[in-house]
Image (tube, rainbow, N blue to C red):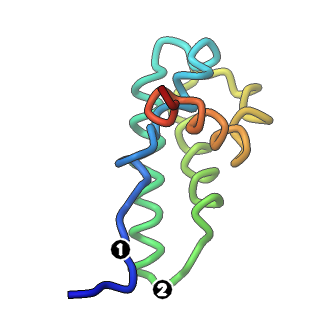
Amino acid sequence: MSHAAYVFDAYGTLFDVHAAVRRHAGAMGPDGQAFSDLWRAKQLEYSWIRTLMGAYTDFWALTEQSLDYAFARFPSADKSSRQPCWTPTGISTAIRKSPACSST
């Protein structure tokens, strides 16, 4: 049997989705893990809802919207860290530098 392509979900499977929050833990305060959990949950929830509605939104836009939601829910998180740490470039850098993506 031959296959033209193999497809799998790398986000959360191969990439550490909590790496960005850990990298900026000092700015997140005592609720850093809960912040990260809510951010990721909302990110997926927004993606599913928009897909079901037939209202495509770029995944980075969903990421930023869910991040804003998490900042609103956790007043202990330093909102001044929103830019530039939480841009797609900053998030991607944190994920690439996480132990899961490091070479040995």
Earlier in the chain: of badge 1 and badge 2, it is: 1
Q: Nearer the viewer, residue 102 or 64?
A: 102
Q: Secondary structure at mark 2?
A: loop
Q: Residues within 10 Å of mark 2 (few under 14, many from 20)?
A: few
Q: How many marks?
A: 2
Please give the residue where the numbered disc 2 appears in the rendered image. Answer: 54
Kindly indicate whether the residue at mark 2 contacts the one at mark 1 (C-beta within 8 angstroms): no
Residue at image point 57% right, 32% down? 20
The location of residue 93, given as percent across then percent down, is 66, 37
**Residue at 59% across / 30% down in the picture?**
97
Disc 1 is placed on an element classified as loop
Give the residue type at disc 1: Tyr
Answer left or right for 27 relative to 45: right
Q: Nearer the viewer, residue 66 or 98?
A: 98
Q: Is residue 62 left or right of residue 93?
A: left
Dot 1 crowding, Cα within 10 Å, few <14, some 14–19, many 20+:
few
Q: Amino acid at mark 2?
A: Gly
Write down the residue under mark 1.
6
Q: CA distance from mark 1 to mark 2?
A: 26 Å
Question: Could you tell me which residue is drawn at 39 percent across and 36 percent down?
Answer: 37
Q: Position of residue 45 (x, y in %)?
A: 40, 59
In the image, residue 2 sits, relative to residue 77, either above or below, namely below
Which is in the foreground here, disc 1 or disc 2?
1
